[in-house]
Image (spheres, helix red, strand yellow):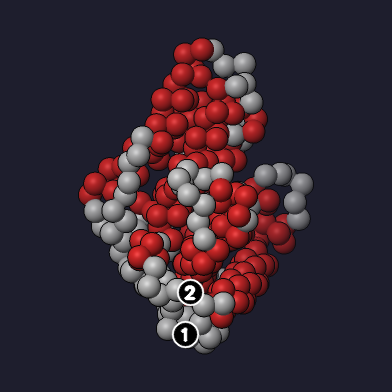
Amino acid sequence: MHSASSKTEAMESCISGGDGTELSMDVVDQSDSLLPSNLSSGNVPILQGSLPRTPVLFPHRDKEEDGDDVLPGALEHETVMEEEHKQILAKLRFVVELVDTLIQVAEQKENPLIAAMSNRKTEPSSAFRRAEQLVVYVRALHMLSSALLLAQRNVASRVLHPSPAVQNVLNVLNDKYHQCLVRSQELASLGLPGQDPAMAVISAERIMYKHAIELCQTAALDELFGNPQLCSQRYQTAYMMLHTLSEQVHSDQDRTVLARYKNAVEKRLRILERQGFVTAVNTC
């Protein structure tokens, strides 16, 4: 059980996300417009620079690194690979994890009960919820497309080697690309009202930001009421989303706000790690 001061610190550092701070979300690329011109499988644009750097906090660890009783062949595939290969593989895995989160966020938007429980004063219309889903799926498509291009380019240059781990993550990326493409086409086919002014403010970045803050608030409440074992995944997911946004925004004010929340989340994760609720903290 946390001490009273520790609980208060958790509340102050992370529930402060509910202070009404709003990001301008002037992002590096504005290509996730509400209705993409073409959602065919061969015409989703590749966004240069749309992939964030992989955060050094809580990165994936290869199974080969976690035990001593692995086969030499498995070690040869990943552990002895060049550092560039490992970095690119980590980036690809990060995209898989991020896209999984985006898909969850998009599907939550489809649920009117969840939407009604959000901070909005009025329940959003079904058309508004579809629009939110669509921009999130299109953002996921751009990230997947960029990740696949990154892999293709580095395999061709022999920096990324076609190891079993690489082949597996590429298969996952392709599957998720197809999943997001199909959902985007379904949502676009339903049509969206073009005259609704509310549609103009929808962006994937704003949705990601609000979701990250909600995760922080829920995780902080878990800590406050003595359930730290429930909050580590929420904090880690929030950190991942805040990190991604911090790599994409142009505004210094946005960067400052995001850095503040990232630092608060990292602090909570460090405390949870010392208490044994988060494993394998690796900052190297």
Give the number of the mark in front: 2 or 1: 2
Horizontally, residue 160 falls left or right of residue 31, namely right
User: Where 205 falls versus 40 (above or below)?
Assistant: above
Is residue 248 visible to the viewer in this orientation of the structure? yes
Horizontally, residue 280 falls left or right of residue 253, namely right
As measured in the structure, the alpha-carbon distance from the residue carrying label 2 to the one carrying label 1 is 15 Å
Q: Residue at x 38, y 73 (%)?
A: 195
User: Where 274 falls versus 22 (above or below)?
Assistant: above
Which element carries disc 1, helix, strand or loop? loop
Which element carries disc 2, helix, strand or loop? loop
Is residue 275 visible to the viewer in this orientation of the structure? no
Horizontally, residue 18 falls left or right of residue 41, namely left
User: Where 235 falls versus 182 (above or below)?
Assistant: above
Tell me the residue that label 2 is attached to.
192
Rendering coords of residue 272 (x, y %): 56, 28
Q: Nearer the viewer, residue 266 or 274?
A: 266
- Please identify the quarter of the rendering in which residue 275 is found: top right
Q: Judge the density around disc 1: few (<14), some (14-19), many (≥20) Cα neighbours within 10 Å.
A: few
**Residue 38, which numbered label?**
1
Q: Are marks 2 and 1 in contact (CB under 8 Å)?
A: no
Which residue type does callout 1 highlight? Asn
Which residue type does callout 2 highlight? Leu
Q: Residue at x 52, y 77 (%)?
A: 191
Q: Residue at x 43, y 61 (%)?
A: 204
Q: Which callout, 2 or 1, points at the residue further toward the start of the chain?
A: 1
Q: Nearer the viewer, residue 15 or 277?
A: 15
Rendering coords of residue 235 (x, y %): 53, 39
Q: Looking at this rendering, what residue extends furthest in the top direction? A: 4
Could you tell me which quadrant the N terminus lies in? top right
**Residue 225, which numbered label?**
none
Q: Judge the density around disc 2: few (<14), some (14-19), many (≥20) Cα neighbours within 10 Å.
A: some
Rendering coords of residue 240 (x, y %): 48, 49
